[in-house]
Amino acid sequence: MSNWVEVLNEYSTKDLEQRKVWYSPVVEAYDRARPRYPEALIQRVVEVAQLSPESRILEVGCGSGVATVDFARLGYAIDAVEPNLEFCRLAQQNCAAYPQVNIIPQTFEEWQVESGKYQIVLAANAWHWIASDIKYVKASEALQNNGALVLLWNMSLEPSREVHQVLDEVYQQIAPSIAPQYEGKDTQEEILQGLGKLIGDSGLFEAPVTETITCDRVYEVDRYLELLSSYSPYIALDAPTREALFSGLRSAIDQQFEGKIQLFNLSAYQIARKR
């Protein structure tokens, strides 16, 4: 089993009550620092999924509403299921201008399926939190006969290999257990292919159509550390280690890269028709 599959399984096997509060300490940082999805990617989803003005969307794990807003501003009615109450509050705030958005404070596992109601089931960097023996079954049941599962992914934001090597020295000194492996475009595409295979292997959906957009983003050091703080490995660190790590990363970025770094990642969609 490849490492990324093991990592995904770690998320989906967490206790439901733990999942409900996992991001609570960092919801504001998550909303400020997590990358948005390119507008061109959202437009392609609309086209490929063949959404009509009347289409209704079920979103699984909306978080602070990053993708919810993208689709709400296009006029779509959305039922968004989110287990974290702090995220629900923030999502309601971010979607206040869109009365057609309904934030539901529940886990997808506990949510009562409304059969055949939705044109698409959407998950934006959240699908890996749901157990495989539940998510495909419930998504299929919620969809209309011509409906589709739509997964959005912002893959890991990472610096150039040269910058990564500099920052890795800090990790090895302070928190080697969470030192990120350098991926690059080829590895991120490989991971996406594997994620797509899992969808087809469910037996409930066709093999997905996948499209990627290459993104380059510049993060000032404060925003970069805020971004890291919103990721699970850093949430799980004890506070003294996390503070020491961030202090070391800040010093390296300030001294060697003038307080900012350029980051790369792939943004992607995967659209799989219901069988």
Image: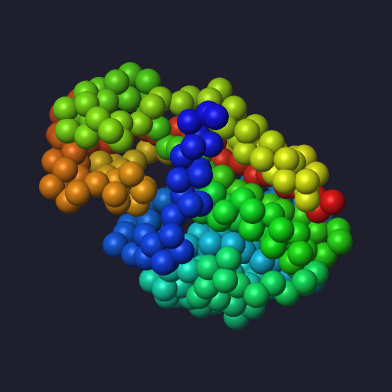
Residue found farthest to the bottom: 99
Quick check: 241 above or below 63?
A: above
Q: How many marks?
A: 0
Quick check: 92 above or below 23?
A: below
Relative depth, front residue between 186 and 178: 178
Image quadrant in which the N terminus is located: top right
Q: Can the viewer see residue 39?
A: no
Relative depth, front residue between 186 and 203: 203
The residue at 65%/44% (across/down) is: 269
Relative depth, front residue between 78 and 2: 2
Q: Answer left or right for 176 relative to 196.
A: left
Residue 46 picture location, percent across and down: 73, 54
The residue at 64%/57% (across/down) is: 135
Relative depth, front residue between 220 and 233: 233
Q: Can the viewer see residue 189?
A: yes
The residue at 48%/25% (across/down) is: 184
Residue 190 picture location, percent across and down: 59, 27
